[in-house]
Structures are given as C-alpha cells and as structure tokens.
Image: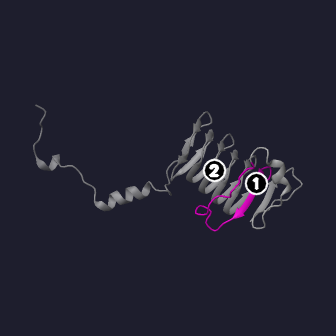
C-alpha cells in the first residue's frame, strides 16, 4: 500500500567504514572536548563516580570521585578521595586529592593529603594536610592517613612529620608559610 519505489539503490542503508567507528570511539575518550558532566548544587550523590571525561561538582558527593578533569565549584563538596588529571577546587574536599595538576582556588577548603605533580594554592584557600610530590600521582598510591581518626588528633599533632612528606596548613590569614613542591 505504501510502497513507492522498489529500486534497491534507494533502499540501501549506509554502513560507515571501519575507520569512522574507531574515530567516533576516540572522540568519546578521556580527552573529549564535549561538555562536562554536572552535579548541580541541589544534588547529593552517595557512592563513587568514575568518568573519563570532565566533571563539574556544585552539589555534594559522599564517595570517591575519579575523572579526567574535575572542578569542585564554590558550592561543591566531596567527602572521599578525588583523583584526576586536573583537579580544581573552589569548594570543599574532605579526603585526599591525587592529580597531575591540582589547584586550590580562593575560598577552597581541603582537609586531607594531596599527592601531585603540580600544585598551586591561591590566597584565602584553606588546606590542612600533607603534600607530597610525585611524577605520576595517578599511579602512585594515596598517602596513608588523610585525616587522623577521632581521638588521635592530639597524639598525631605531637609527632613530627615524616622527612619525605611536607606538612602544610595554609590560609591567607595564617601566619604560617605553606610547604609546596
């Protein structure tokens, strides 16, 4: 009833060449130039997030976050480990950070250790933890104790830091200098 033309040429479907499917797969990889996935400020996620692309967090994530490029916005908060090629913190992280390029921007608050290849801390960013440089922080395991267990704070404060780790506690109003690698 609705057959208009039975010509085989018009009924053929397009099959992309093998190389085209490979290039499409590579476009969706870790260095994708697409839009970042966004966790909005009214969202709360409990559990781990794993992504190869970019991730922007304005809400709360209670769990570990692994992505290519991670931005934790001014209203964002992560309770867990943050691991990425580039990690930019404007909000709050309660846990360790591992990244090749780590930036703590003005207003950021990090309570945990940072393992990095490159680190910058802007004025009025608050950081409490240890800093350690690594050529490839994504392959190196995270520092052992990001935060002392409850009740151990006084005893761990009395112990000197290990010689290969650099302790740092910075803020713009702090009289203490920061130890950066």
Colour option used: one colour
- Residue 169, horizontal then vertical, whole percent: 81, 54
Decide: is 135 above or below 40.
below
Name the residue rendered at 12%, 38% in the picture.
4
Secondary structure beneath label 2: loop
- Residue 106, horizontal then vertical, whole percent: 75, 49
* Mark 1 nearby-residue class (10 Å; few <14, some 14–19, many ≥20): many
Decide: is 73 above or below 16.
above
Question: Magenta: predominant secondary structure element?
Answer: loop
Left or right for 150, reference 42: right
* Mark 2 nearby-residue class (10 Å; few <14, some 14–19, many ≥20): many
Residue 29 visible in the picture: yes
Name the residue rendered at 56%, 48% in the picture.
55
Nearest the viewer among 82 and 68 is: 82
Mark 2 or mark 1: whose residue is earlier in sequence = 2
Instruction: Please tell me whether residue 8 belongs to the stretch shown in magenta.
Output: no
Hey, which quadrant is residue 77 in on the image? Answer: top right
Q: Name the residue under label 1.
A: 129
- In the picture, the quarter occupied by the C terminus is bottom right
Nearest the viewer among 83 and 57 is: 83
Q: How far apart are marks 2 and 1 (CA)?
A: 13 Å
Secondary structure beneath label 1: strand
Q: Mark 2 points at which residue?
A: 81
Residue extent of the magenta highlight:
122-148
């Amino acid at each position: 009833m609705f057959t208009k033309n039975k010509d085989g040429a018009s009924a053929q479907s397009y099959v992309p060449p093998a190389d085209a499917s490979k290039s499409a797969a590579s476009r969706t990889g870790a260095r994708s130039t697409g839009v970042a996935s966004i966790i909005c400020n009214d969202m709360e996620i409990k559990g781990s997030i794993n992504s190869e692309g970019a991730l922007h967090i304005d809400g709360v994530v209670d769990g570990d976050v692994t992505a290519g490029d991670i931005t934790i916005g001014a209203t964002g908060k992560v309770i867990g480990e943050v691991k990425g090629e580039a990690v930019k913190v404007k909000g709050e992280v309660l846990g360790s950070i591992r990244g090749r390029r780590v930036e703590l921007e003005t207003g950021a608050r990090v309570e945990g250790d940072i393992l990095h290849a490159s680190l910058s801390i802007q004025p009025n960013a608050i950081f409490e933890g240890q800093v350690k440089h690594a050529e490839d922080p994504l392959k190196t395991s995270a520092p052992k104790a990001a935060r002392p267990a409850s009740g151990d704070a006084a005893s761990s404060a009395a112990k000197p830091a290990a010689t290969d780790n650099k302790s740092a506690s910075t803020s713009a109003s702090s009289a203490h200098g920061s130890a950066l690698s």
